[in-house]
Amino acid sequence: MLQHSPPPEYRVQQITEEEVRLKLLGNWTLASTIPSLDPIRDLLDRTALRSISFDTSELKTWDSLLPVFILRLIDLCAPPAVELQFDGLPAGAKNLLHLSCSTPPKPLKKKPDTSFITRLGHTTISLVDKGEGLISFTGEIIIACIQTLNGKSKFRYNDFWNFIQSTGADALPIVSLISVLVGVILAFVGAVQLQMFGVQIYIANLVGLAMVMEMGAMMSGVIMAGRTGAAYAAQLGTMQVNEEIDALRTLGISPVAFLVLPRMFALMLMLPLLCVYADLLGILGGAIIGVSMLDLSLVEYFEYTRKAIQLDQCLQGLIKSAVYGILVGYAGCLRGLQCGRSASSVGQAATSAVVTGIVLIVIADAIMTFLFNFSKTM
């Protein structure tokens, strides 16, 4: 027959009016239920108990159930300041209790204040800190540009030509695809409306002016923000994680002159060329719709396009694209240098670089469009 192990239990032995001894019996293991402390609680309510000791002479086996019982007893006896004497406990149990009692409990986290004034204050402080970072980074770029012109900075020309390659020729496939599709979309949307009035020939004017003045530069800038701006942020963010940027500062080399300027100059020079390329392909996309859907001749389409586009309008698009190149490089390098020290921070920096670059492009486009139109009315 199988013999059942005796369950854990204890007996209260009154030694004096202020002292009792707990005699532990049975197997104090997690396979059993922990004994109730109600007898001790009643004893504390009825007597002026000041000391509790333990007798484990008849204790069979024990595991973590025994220290848990003692800890609950400590919590029960804490308010009356009852002293517990652990001399009668097994050595292992005493060590576990010593470790448990020597570790202070974690303080409760104070619930954050979520009032409107508090959130407004935190937002204001965050904006001021970000503004200081932008001003500091912009100042470093200006100083690095001046030092580069004076020949006093570590400008990497080899890296500059590599960035010219990656931001120029390597970006042609995606720019080609997007530009042709944008021209097709503009022509298709315009054709639906212009056919109602029988002036579908002016689709050439619509597509040509839209691509030269706005869409060529805008789409090239957005493409480079998602393609190159994110790459810049990931590259510099990885260098930040590997502490390579800290090593450059230790050697007395400015990371802005060494890493940022070649990237920004490459984008500033190549984006106008990509803009011209995008303009031509966008006009070609519009010609596809004009010839296939509106029964226009190819010569007639390009002739109307040539008459509609003026030199100052082309320059307007080129100036915008150069500004977009500076902003995309600025946003990518800024987020890369602000990256944290973990792999997730690199991904966040790349995402933030794309968002920041596109937002700056839209804001700059609105400002420059207003200034160009205002200058024509002067």
Image (cartoon, helix red, strand yellow):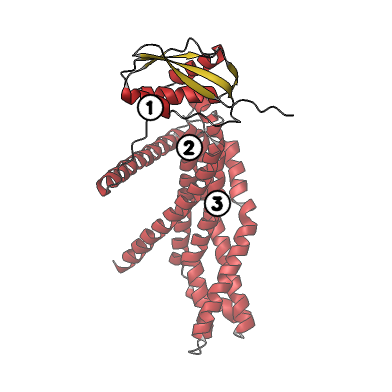
Check the image and name the residue furthest to the right: 1
Vertical side of 156 occupied by 309: above or below: below
Position of residue 273 in the picture relative to residue 36 (left or right): right
Query: Could you tell which of marks 1 and 2 lies nearer the N-terminus?
Result: 1
On-image quarter of the N terminus: top right
The residue pinned by badge 2 equals 337
Report the disc number at residue 41: 1
Q: Total label count?
A: 3
Vertical side of 77 occupied by 151: above or below: below
Position of residue 294 in the picture relative to residue 197 (left or right): right
Q: Position of residue 293 (x, y in %)?
A: 61, 83
Residue placed most toward the observer, 124 or 141: 124
**Label 3 SS:** helix
Report the disc number at residue 270: 3
Q: Residue at x 60, y 71 (%)?
A: 284
Work out whether residue 53 can be spotted: yes
Kindly identify the amino acid type of the residue bearing the numbered disc 3: Met
Kindly identify the amino acid type of the residue bearing the numbered disc 2: Leu
Query: Could you tell which of marks 3 and 2 lies nearer the N-terminus?
Result: 3
